[in-house]
Image (cartoon, helix red, strand yellow):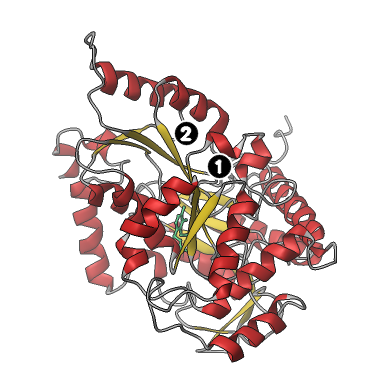
């Protein structure tokens, strides 16, 4: 039936395909759960039983304890740390778990202002504002920056929080081909001139939104080229660094540092504390004027309870370790380790014949499974052999581009990675997802 639907072939690879989505939901209904989480193929509930920086997971339903290749624990800060943990406990005793107040009405502690200054200094912008959740940072901030009469041009693979923020803003939204500066320029030219000579600019404001590392692709943003296009057409840039801040760059300052971009050339820098910093919440860093505007106008700042003080303290301490301000060189070691681990793991997977997406230095490593039917088999077999791998499928990816997504951490040892490679290689043979021969066939 689907083949009779006009335009089926091209649309079925897109996220928005109505027919594929309906079909998929019907199949899910039959199984009573998302297809990707077939019985025994994933952890429904986990228990932390060890103090090893979230490196292992344990199912509550049995005693399986696995090497964790799924969490965004890039620098290994997600658990006990000799510098962070005592300070977090101290802040819990001093401030308790919640301020029970919004920022403007008694919810601002010294920790909140300290983190705003530190986050701004860390990413190289004049000021910053905090939010209790990374998702809300995008979805609540974008509507405060742009509205009706404005134009958002968004990368086709941007995160759902950006998509929702853009939709909720009332601005016109256009999408450019993933990570393609050339297509971005085409869209901008079309939107500004509409193919006609024009004497005025038809949009009040244009914002181009991209991610530093794409969370389902492991790919680095082509930021220098995108910034050049934005400057040419006088568009603002909005960069989501959820997966790149703390994880890449010589001193952990994200894709700007890695790609040699001056942070002054990015208008709005967004990031989350839920990955490299082992905490929760998000930030926007920008000019003093923009941050002041957000502090006065953003409902998620004015009406939401402020970030939990111990969570704020965790981020402050983690940034201090990264910057070496704890008096040790553990930060530099962690950064060197995540780079080494990521590059080693990616190149070994490729040598084995897997199709691995993404760029060097990126700790996000999707292994292509393509066929959604291979998902449960892949994750169940890995789990049986004590390696926990996250699998991602429609609607988070196009239907036929299912994948397993590995997240490498600085806390993985070489021994851990060798064990994981061995398991993934065997399971890959079993499930049939090695698409390239590791060595040329012998004739
Ligand atoms: N932006 C991107 C690119 C993300 O991948 C995510 C979540 N992984 C978020 C924003 C939302 O962040 P959080 O999980 O901290 O709410």
Between 63 and 71, the one nearer to me in the picture: 71
Residue at image coords 41%, 72%:
103
The residue pinned by badge 2 equals 179
Between 245 and 179, the one nearer to me in the picture: 245
The residue pinned by badge 1 equals 219
Q: Quadrant of the N terminus?
A: top left
Residue at image coords 14%, 38%:
4
Name the side, left or right, on which 345 lies relative to 93. right
Label 2 – label 1 distance at C-alpha: 9 Å
Q: Quadrant of the C terminus?
A: top right
**Residue 119 placement (x, y as % from top left):** 59, 58
Residue at image coords 34%, 65%:
300
**Residue 179 placement (x, y as % from top left):** 47, 34
**Residue 12 placement (x, y as % from top left):** 27, 41
Disc 1 crowd rating (10 Å Cα; few below 14, some 14-19, many 20+) is many
Q: Looking at the image, can residue 134 be seen?
A: yes
Name the side, left or right, on which 185 lies relative to 11. right
Up/down of 437 relative to 342, above or below: above
Q: Earlier in the sequence, mark 2 or mark 1?
A: 2
Between 353 and 288, the one nearer to me in the picture: 288
Q: Are marks 2 and 1 in contact (CB under 8 Å)?
A: yes
Secondary-structure class at tag 1: loop
Q: Which mark is residue 287?
A: none
**Residue 427 placement (x, y as % from top left):** 60, 61
């Amino acid at each position: 039936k689907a083949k009779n639907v006009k335009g089926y072939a091209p649309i079925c690879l897109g996220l928005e395909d109505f027919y594929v989505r309906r079909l998929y939901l019907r199949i899910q209904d039959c199984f009573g759960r998302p297809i990707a989480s077939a019985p025994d193929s994933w952890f429904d509930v986990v228990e932390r039983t060890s103090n090893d920086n979230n490196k292992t997971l344990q199912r509550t339903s049995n005693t399986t304890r696995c090497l964790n290749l799924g969490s965004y624990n890039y620098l290994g800060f997600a658990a006990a740390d000799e510098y962070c943990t005592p300070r977090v406990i101290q802040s819990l005793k001093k401030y308790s778990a919640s301020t029970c107040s919004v920022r403007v009405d008694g919810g601002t502690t010294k920790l909140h202002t300290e983190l705003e200054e530190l986050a701004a200094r860390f990413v190289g912008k004049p000021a910053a504002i905090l939010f209790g959740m990374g998702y809300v940072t995008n979805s609540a901030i974008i509507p405060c920056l742009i509205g009706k009469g404005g134009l958002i041009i968004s990368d086709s693979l941007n995160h759902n929080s950006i998509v929702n923020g853009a939709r909720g803003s009332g601005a016109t939204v256009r999408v450019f081909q993933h990570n393609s500066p050339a297509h971005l320029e085409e869209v901008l030219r079309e939107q500004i001139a509409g193919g006609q000579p024009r004497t005025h600019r038809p949009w009040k404001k244009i914002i181009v939104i991209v991610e530093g590392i794409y969370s389902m692709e492991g790919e680095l943003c082509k930021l220098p080229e995108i910034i050049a296009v934005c400057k040419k057409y006088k568009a603002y840039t909005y960069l989501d660094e959820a997966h790149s801040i703390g994880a890449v760059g010589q001193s952990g300052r994200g894709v700007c540092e890695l790609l040699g971009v001056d942070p002054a050339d990015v208008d709005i820098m967004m990031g989350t504390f839920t990955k490299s910093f082992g905490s929760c919440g998000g930030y926007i860093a920008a000019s003093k004027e923009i941050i002041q505007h957000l502090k006065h106008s953003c409902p998620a700042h004015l009406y939401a309870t402020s970030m939990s003080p111990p969570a704020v303290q965790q981020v402050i301490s983690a940034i201090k370790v990264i910057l070496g301000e704890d008096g040790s060189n553990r930060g530099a070691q962690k950064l060197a380790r995540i780079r080494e681990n990521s590059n080693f793991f990616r190149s070994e997977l490729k040598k084995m014949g897997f199709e691995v997406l993404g760029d060097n230095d990126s700790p996000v490593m999707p292994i292509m499974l393509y066929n959604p039917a291979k998902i449960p088999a892949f994750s169940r077999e890995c789990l049986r052999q004590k390696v926990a791998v996250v699998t991602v499928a429609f609607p988070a990816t196009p239907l036929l581009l299912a994948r397993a997504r590995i997240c490498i951490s600085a806390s993985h040892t070489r021994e851990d990675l060798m064990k994981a490679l061995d398991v993934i290689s065997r399971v890959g043979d079993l499930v049939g997802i090695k698409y390239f021969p590791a060595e040329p066939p012998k004739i």
